[in-house]
Image (tube, grey):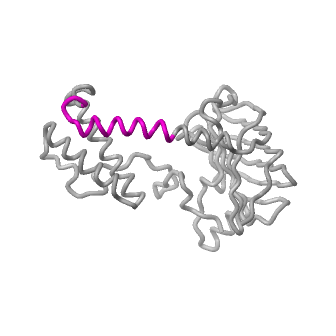
Amino acid sequence: MIPTGRRGAVPDDGAGGIRDRRIPVGAWSEGMADSGEQGLGAIAKKWLRAKRVEWTTGVQRTREYAEHESWLAEREMERELGHQAGRALVPAYRDWEDRRDADEVRRRQAEQEAVRALPRATVRLSVSGKRYDGSWWGYLPVRLDREPDLLTVEVVVPADDRPLVGGHPLLGATLLVPGYTGDGGYDVDAAARHADAAGEPFDPFSWTVTLEAEDVLLAWVPDVGPARIDLSGDVLRWTARMTGESGEHDVDLQLSNLPPVPAA
């Protein structure tokens, strides 16, 4: 089975396109963005309501909506008073911003430590197409995640050490091996068509190569071209035609010296 709600996937707009990542205003709480409210006090109230939801809810989607609402309120506050004036006049905003900055530093440090702890594999990447055209090889951290019939392989690129492929920074890659049973060849196109015929959900963002920016990626989707994964020992090779806002590209990604596959 090929899953759909993979964490971090970009949502579909229902017509095969990529939906805007921004959360719609007022989507999570009726009356949150009342057009009749004006002035600094109203903005502060709106921000506090959003932050209260963000800090207390256990529902991820609700928290994402609340984060966006509070972000919008912050932008309003900055426009109303200017950044420093807002910090001086609204203690809750000042305190939260200080906590946010400290939390962000801790989060980034934890992420960097986790990436440094990952095993490294030899990576060879070749991309050819309208926008990206180049190749690179070197050593990058990799993460393997095993489920009963799936293997996910992620190339994790450290934020402070991003290699250039044809002049564009490589930010990462994710590959899903559907129906994983060990060494062998996996026809991703055939697996996707089988899943589609069986009425199972299909997530094209299970196969991505991200270049240039976090929201600019190449993804494999049916009908664009063939896609195949070959596994042999500690070597994985992905060959596919991938597509994105930058057009179609032929991608050849080879990972060698992979760590052992974890147990399901």
Can I make out residue 252 in this image? no
For residue 135, above or below residue 178: above
Can I make out residue 253 in this image? yes
For residue 263, above or below residue 154: below
Q: Does the magenta stretch include residue 37?
A: no
Count of labels in the image: 0
For residue 1, above or below residue 93: below
Q: Does the magenta stretch include residue 95?
A: yes
Give the side of residue 71 with respect to residue 192, left or right. left
Q: Nearer the viewer, residue 229 or 16?
A: 229
Identify the residue at the far right of this view: 233
Q: Position of residue 90 (x, y in %)?
A: 20, 35
User: Magenta span: helix, strand or loop, mainly?
Assistant: helix
Q: Nearer the viewer, residue 263 or 228?
A: 263
For the point 87% across and 54% down, the residue is 233
For the point 79% across and 44% down, the residue is 254
Q: Where is residue 227 in the image (x, y as percent from the top left)?
A: 74, 53
* Residue range corresponding to the magenta coloring: 87-107
Give the side of residue 255 with respect to residue 219, left or right. right
For the point 38% across and 39% down, the residue is 100
Q: Position of residue 83 (x, y in %)?
A: 27, 27
Give the side of residue 215 with respect to residue 252, left or right. left
The quadrant where residue 171 appears: top right
For residue 124, above or below residue 84: below
The quadrant where residue 121 appears: top right
